[in-house]
Image (cartoon, rainbow, N blue to C red):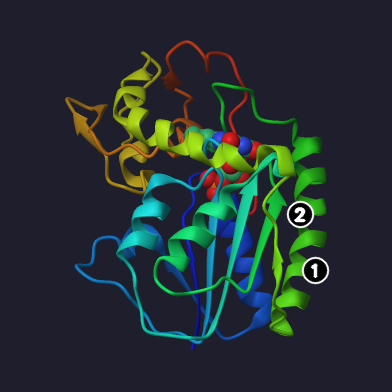
Amino acid sequence: MKKIYYFTGTGNSLYIARKIADGIGDVELVAIKDEMKKDCIVIDSDFTGFVYPVYCFGIPRIVRDFLVKIDIKSSGYFFCVANAGAPKYVPANIMTEKLLKNKGVSLNSAFVVAMPNNYIPMSAAPSDEQIKHIIANSDIKIAEIIGFLKEKKSGYIEKGLFFVRFAHKFANFFYKNLQKASKNYNVSDKCNSCGECAKICPVDNITMIDGKPSWGKNCEQCMACLQHCPVEAIEYGRSSVGKKRYWNPFV
Ligand SMILES: Cc1cc2nc3c(=O)[nH]c(=O)nc-3n(C[C@H](O)[C@H](O)[C@H](O)COP(=O)(O)O)c2cc1C
């Protein structure tokens, strides 16, 4: 049995997970957001992958919580694929390596793939041309990853440039600040009460109150609500105003 567990905000991680699953064949794709609703999560596949975006140099909080919660009953092949706007500066896989080590499991391989940046407070989405270019390049890297995984090779762990390896620790500050940061979301008069934001939120953190979204205390900062809003009515403070939105065009 082969399984890939993924978390995605704007589709990049799902795009990568699907491509790897298709390339390997006979792989079940499992959404971490759904697994987290279970009381206990048993990993018993003999080929297991984790695919996730990078948040603040580290892994998303929900992925960390998932890796803490899992009960591993397999001694098979384990790999992970992080994806990020600036892949050279990504030590996120160190976190996964450590969390799995706590469970007595060694990662066989770990990769980082460059994908379009979705962190809108920092920058607008790339142009459509740039998005196509970045994703075409990611396809080359994904094909290499598939080749590696098919042979079940071990010992290749991508951790980012040496001088940024400590930076995954910043993710802990990011987790602490998540609840406060979610207060930055606001909705403009453009909102037509379609409820798409509540449907797309991977952690069911949005409730429609009087036809407008209201954010709860469980935000992961994945930006799905803001990026997916069909009328661009959701903003993150003032930092997103007037900026191009991003959604993986193939998902
Ligand atoms: C809250 C947040 C923090 C991020 N932090 C980083 C980062 O530290 N380094 C980086 O290169 N990209 C960062 N990104 C960009 C995402 O990792 C990247 O766009 C990823 O491909 C999104 O994947 P998804 O579409 O599956 O959600 C961040 C994005 C978000 C939403």
Which residue type carries mark 2? Ser
Rendered position, 152 above or below 19: below
Res 105 seen here: yes
Dot 1, how many residues are within 10 Å of its Cα: few (below 14), some (14-19), or many (20+)?
few
Q: Position of residue 100 (x, y in %)?
A: 46, 66
Q: Is residue 175 above or below residue 209?
A: below
Q: Position of residue 61 (x, y in %)?
A: 39, 46
Is 221 displayed left or right of 14 in the figure?
A: left
Displayed quadrant of residue 138 = bottom right
Task: Name which residue lies at 32% across and 65% down.
Answer: 35
**Helix, strand or loop at mark 2:** helix
Above or below, 63 relative to 26: above
**Can the viewer see residue 247 in this picture?**
no
The spot of residue 150 in percent (x, y) is 71, 83
| Residue in view at x 75 percent, y 50 percent | 135
What residue is shown with label 1? 144
* Residue 57 left/right relative to 206: right
Q: Which residue is mark 2?
A: 138
Left or right? Give the position of 110 relative to 40.
right
Q: Tell me the kind of residue under disc 1.
A: Glu
**Residue in front for this viewpoint, 142 or 228:** 142
- The disc label shown at residue 210, or none: none
Label 2: how many Cα within 10 Å (few below 14, some 14–19, many 20+): some
Residue at disc 1, CB closer than 8 Å to ligand 1 = no
- Point out the quarter of the image occupied by ligand 1: top right
